[in-house]
Image (cartoon, helix red, strand yellow):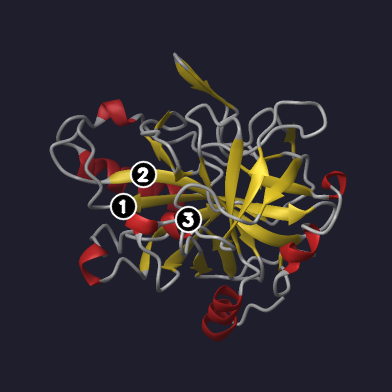
Amino acid sequence: MKRMLVAAVSIAAALALAVPAGAITNGMPDEGEHPYVGQLFFYVPDYVDSRFTDPGGWFNCSGTLVSPTIVLTAGHCTLGVGDEGEETTSSGGSGGNDVWVSFAEAPDYEGLLPSSNYIPDGNEERYEDWVAYIESRPEWHQGTAYPHPQYDDALFYWYDLGVVVLDEPVRMPEYGQVAELRTLNGYMRMDKAQRRFTPVGYGLEKVLPIGVEGGDTRRKANVMLVTLNGTGNAPRGSFAIFSNSLGTVHRGGTCFGDSGGPIFEKGTNVVVAVTSFGQSPNCTGIGGGYRVDQPDDLMWLEEEFGVTP
């Protein structure tokens, strides 16, 4: 679920049934286990924010570094990203460079002035100030955003996959790994106790009737694969549905801000899906992960970005 930054670390999101997903709820600190998972911070110039006289909005998602320059994330975290502050939607919404990624456990937003300082007619100034601060911090790596060529916001659950190509390589001892073709199919023949996966992300930790808790810190959960048959409007086979149980066995699930974050085969660096949507405004129940082990997605990743299982 994508999260909109209305202040340095505060969130406003419109929640609805089967909405694009955003943190790990009731999970555990990552504690350095997945250093190749990062938080995206990006600007969408034509997003309409009612607080401002001019359009423009800032958002967070999560993503996985699968090579020194390639970050795997969700399609809805890459479509319409700005290009030096200018909109890209009219030309397809791809190729914007107003996106930065931090691989810190808790990314640095300390120097961002609150959005309230810019309301109502300072949105352009906010953009300039925030970009200047982010670009002054070495932990933030700028890139260019590319949604799956068939991704459509109106049907985000069909091709909800995206890539950010970093301007400069980030060297790590290990990177995430894309799953092999139809890896998840084999899990459906296993006992439920063996269908364990690890989502990782920077999203909210709780969504309450009167507010939200947490976010902007890398956390992990332990979830169970429920089905590959889709749910609601999600097509059969494209999505993996995972439990977001609050129990001690499952240890949490995904929430707003975790969108695009990896869902790993438990105990590995293998990404089988990226967090895409949830069906509860309180981030309970189930969460949907867009599968990356499908033929069209693997073909796109290999042909366009050289990423292979």
| Residue at mark 3 | 100
| Residue at mark 2 | 58
Q: What separation in Å lies between label 1 and label 2 (alpha carbons)?
A: 6 Å
Q: What separation in Å lies between label 2 and label 3 (alpha carbons)?
A: 11 Å
The answer to the question of whether label 2 and label 3 lie on touching residues, with beta carbons closer than 8 A, is no
Q: What separation in Å lies between label 1 and label 3 (alpha carbons)?
A: 13 Å
Q: Nearer the viewer, residue 129 or 221?
A: 221
Q: Nearer the viewer, residue 224 or 43?
A: 224
The residue that appears at 73% across and 62% down in the rendered structure is 184
Residue 17 at x, y = what percent? 42, 37
Q: Nearer the viewer, mark 2 or mark 3?
A: 2
Of callouts 2 and 3, the N-terminal one: 2
The residue that appears at 73% across and 55% down in the rendered structure is 264
Q: Label for residue 175? A: none
Of callouts 1 and 3, the N-terminal one: 1
Is residue 274 positioned above or below 92 on the image?
above
Is residue 257 positioned above or below 94 on the image?
above
- Residue 225 in sight: yes
Label 2: state its secondary structure: strand
The answer to the question of whether label 1 and label 2 lie on touching residues, with beta carbons closer than 8 A, is yes
- The answer to whether 6 appears left or right of 32 in the picture is left
| Residue at mark 1 | 44
Mark 3 is surrounded, within 10 Å at the Cα level, by few (under 14), some (14 to 19) or many (20 or more) other residues, namely: many
Q: Nearer the viewer, residue 186 or 88?
A: 186
Amino acid type at mark 3: Trp
- Residue 175 in sight: no
- The answer to whether 11 appears left or right of 120 in the picture is right
Identity of the residue furthest to the bottom in this view: 303
- The answer to whether 8 appears left or right of 204 in the picture is left
- The answer to whether 200 appears left or right of 297 in the picture is right
Amino acid type at mark 2: Trp
